[in-house]
Image (spheres, coloured by chain):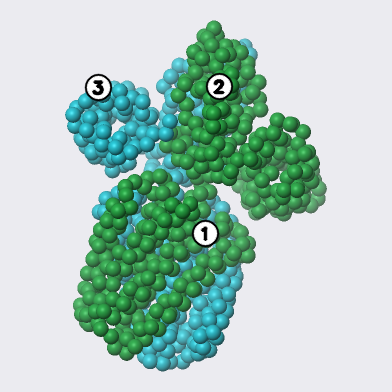
Chain colours: A green, B cyan
């Protein structure tokens, strides 16, 4: 059952394509799940994938197209005509179709939409494109099973059979009134065990979780995770049922968001993978390194300002990487906890209590580290005043760095900027500079140079 | 619909508990979803939660118990008798029940199991406890709907009704033969539209994804995500159907793993939240800071070894934080991409091609940074040899740091250690040391001090 997209397999397919062995390819690829076909196509040249799209069943290639890496899909779509793209979109659920239309140029999108024959499908796609990015409206699909509360059980069963033909999986059956307002839900199980003389209004469950088209996808994900939902209906302002979001899309969303945050924390600014090109990887990584370079140059200038202390206290200059590293580490620790708390909606309590807590935490960590440095000083016979200076600096740097790490993400979040961008190089670099600045000022004050 | 666990709400509940207003509490909490009740209980004292558990419906409190933070649950379980815990476990699905039993001391677990009345339930829990941690066996639940391929459609419908009573949600109906071997699956939808004269063997879908009890949960998650599965059957060595895993548990797993990796990358070694106690947070953060401290002290010693260069080239010492920061950043970038590639199973190609790629990438980044440093040197009138030294060091440090960042996670992974532990402070600290070591050796070689 496990599909392995090995090098040999890819080579085999490539050679079949170059020899135009369409019959052989069709029978070989027929057994693949569309997700496996997408995995394969991610490894092929665009022109090879286009050949496959032309010879294979649209039902499968359309789903594979929706699963592809964005870059790969872009290259393939460029090689397909508006008519060919439209044929693929006809097969897809509205959410996937809208996503693909969204990636096309305005002009091509228009031509593609004109070529789609199913008018309802077009209308639905255009509706989905009208909602703001990252909202439930833009994320939902129009495919759902909907029954009227006034229907009888047999009519309802018949309607479900009709509607379900176009829907891959029936998650829930939603119950609406004559105006299309969401009233509740119905489980197939309950429907099956209901007497056929019943009306739907006697059978349905009036309690139903829902979100509105304006709800952020992040909040939808949180809700579905919390309440273990497999699908959630999306409604408009008048509670009219407009679409539904299913858990498989939310799983992808959660994974992508987590990957993105992880990369941001590591100083990678675009969504890249180990197997992307060197150019792609450079574009994602170099900007943060340049930021680090400028931060480092600032530190050079701070230290130049204390050059006169070199002769008397050279050891201070040996300790700067330690101070900088500590400031960076503490900052990243603090910000990571805050970024996660914000993302998970767990952050409670006032800014004031958070400040007290961070200071308390830094006091404990800073004192421990300070004591270790003083012990180290005793062991190696370091000037006691120098040890004390370093210990006090570590304590204060800990406090400042943790406050920076705590409050920068909170402030960014309040201003509507993704706080994840703060964790990582941004916090590290600014804390490096703060740390070294503080360290030399404290040294000057204690050692009096 | 949105439940908000506000401070006022919590205070209100606390005062009702202290006044033993059980009737009032029961009616007030009846409307809560168990996930909301868990959210509330996470904010209460253990003794207050125990009071709620005693007055509320076990059906709801058991589910809430399963949703609680582990620390909170531990405190509550300590205050409940074996009999009381057994009553809660009777209501839970086997997977949640087994998780809770797993958290008890051996002695208490035994007493609790002895008190569970449903013998099947006990047998199932004991079976689940027998599988190795992090495998599908330990993660699955025994609750599923199973039909025999030889049954007729009407018998099957009747059996499903009987079995489904004990199951919150019917994801899939699994078809087995007389020996219990998994043969395929059946959708309720297909069953509903089949003539009643049919046998199940004429209706079921023989193609079914499955995993074995020994499959790692990580692989199960990857599979379910890739193929958009809502549930997957778990089989034994003879393909006998033993249990099933549902997507809601996988969603929690994916989120928890992502949070853990994110925290590890930020140098936080335990699963903590912003609202945990200062002590908990210190335990998670201090060890990495101490590691950073020892790393910093190593750097001090490396620099002490080059003390004689201080007089002639003090500027080198001003550049150490820059070199260290760059080495750390590059290492974290490389390792983050590898850790993610390993986690997502995307890492392809040989170690040799990866090495070439990393070197190529570092050459581009290192050359760019080197040119910027030389430009900076021109502008501020820095000794050209010093600028060149720093530029060459940046280039080499980039290469070494990216190789360290790439291969440490790969090696850890090969040895069965979670590579996520490498990203963050571990890589940063070791790269700081390597960077400074390289920098001074290159300086010595070029500048000849």
Q: Which residue is mark 1?
A: B337
- Subunit of label 3: B
Q: Quadrant of the C terminus of chain B?
A: bottom left
- Which residue is found at the position 36% from the left and 47% from the top? A347
Q: Is residue A26 visible?
A: no
Q: Which residue is mark 2?
A: A176
Question: Where's residue A329, x and y in %?
Answer: 37, 64
- Residue A128's place in the image compared with B26, above or below, is below
Q: Using the rendered image, report if marks 1 and 3 lie on a common chain.
A: yes
Q: Is residue A267 visible?
A: yes
Label 3 – label 2 distance at C-alpha: 35 Å
Place residue A302 in its image quadrant. Answer: bottom left
- Which residue is found at the position 28% from the left and 43% from the top? B71
Q: Which mark is residue B23?
A: 3
Which circle, 1 or 2, is nearer the viewer? 2
Q: Secondary structure at mark 2?
A: strand
- Subunit of label 2: A
- Residue B192's place in the image compared with B234, above or below, is above
Instruction: In the displayed orientation, state which residue is furthest to the right.
Output: A20
Whether residue A245 sits left or right of residue A44 in the image: it is left
- Which residue is found at the position 38% from the left and 53% from the top? A338
| Residue B173 vs residue A84, the one in the foreground | A84
Question: Where's residue B337, x and y in %?
Answer: 52, 59
Q: Quadrant of the N terminus of chain B?
A: top left
- Residue B310's place in the image compared with A215, above or below, is below
- Subunit of label 1: B
Q: Which mark is residue A33?
A: none
Q: Are marks 1 and 2 in contact (CB under 8 Å)?
A: no
């Amino acid at each position: 059952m496990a599909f392995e997209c090995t090098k040999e397999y890819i080579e085999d397919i490539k050679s079949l394509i170059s020899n135009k062995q369409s019959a052989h390819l069709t029978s070989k690829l027929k057994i693949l799940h569309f997700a496996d076909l997408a995995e394969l196509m991610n490894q092929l040249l665009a022109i090879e994938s286009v050949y496959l799209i032309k010879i294979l069943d649209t039902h499968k290639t359309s789903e594979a197209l929706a699963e592809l890496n964005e870059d790969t899909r872009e290259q393939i779509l460029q090689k397909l005509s508006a008519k060919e793209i439209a044929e693929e979109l006809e097969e897809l659920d509205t959410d996937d179709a809208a996503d693909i239309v969204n990636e096309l140029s305005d002009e091509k999108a228009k031509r593609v939409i004109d070529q789609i024959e199913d008018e309802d499908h077009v209308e639905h796609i255009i509706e989905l494109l009208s909602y703001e990015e990252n909202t439930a409206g833009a994320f939902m699909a129009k495919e759902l099973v909907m029954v009227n509360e006034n229907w009888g059980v047999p009519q309802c069963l018949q309607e479900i059979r009709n509607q379900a033909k176009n829907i891959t999986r029936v998650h829930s059956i939603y119950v609406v009134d004559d105006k299309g307002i969401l009233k509740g839900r119905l489980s197939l199980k309950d429907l099956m065990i209901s007497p056929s003389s019943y009306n739907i209004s006697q059978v349905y469950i009036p309690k139903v979780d829902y979100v509105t088209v304006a709800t952020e996808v992040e909040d939808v994900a949180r809700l579905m995770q919390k309440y273990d939902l497999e699908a959630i209906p999306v409604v408009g302002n008048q509670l009219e049922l407009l679409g539904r979001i299913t858990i498989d899309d939310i799983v992808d969303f959660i994974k992508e968001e987590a990957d993105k945050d992880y990369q941001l924390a590591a100083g990678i600014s675009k969504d890249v993978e180990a197997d992307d090109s060197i150019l792609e990887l450079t574009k994602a990584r170099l900007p943060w390194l340049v930021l680090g370079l400028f931060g480092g140059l600032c530190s050079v200038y701070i230290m130049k300002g204390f050059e006169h202390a070199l002769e008397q206290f050279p050891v201070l200059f040996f300790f700067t990487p330690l101070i900088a590293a500590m400031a960076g580490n503490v900052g990243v620790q603090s910000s990571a906890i805050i970024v996660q708390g914000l993302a998970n909606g767990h952050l409670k309590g006032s800014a004031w209590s958070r400040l007290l807590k961070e200071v308390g935490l830094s006091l404990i960590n800073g004192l421990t580290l300070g004591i270790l440095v003083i012990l180290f000083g005793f062991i190696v016979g370091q000037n006691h005043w120098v040890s004390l200076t370093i210990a006090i600096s570590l304590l204060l740097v800990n406090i400042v760095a943790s406050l920076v790490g705590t409050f920068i993400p909170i402030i960014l979040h309040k201003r509507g900027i993704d706080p994840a961008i703060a964790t990582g190089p941004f916090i590290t670099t600014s804390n490096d500079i703060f740390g070294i600045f503080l360290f030399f000022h404290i040294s000057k004050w204690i050692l009096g140079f």
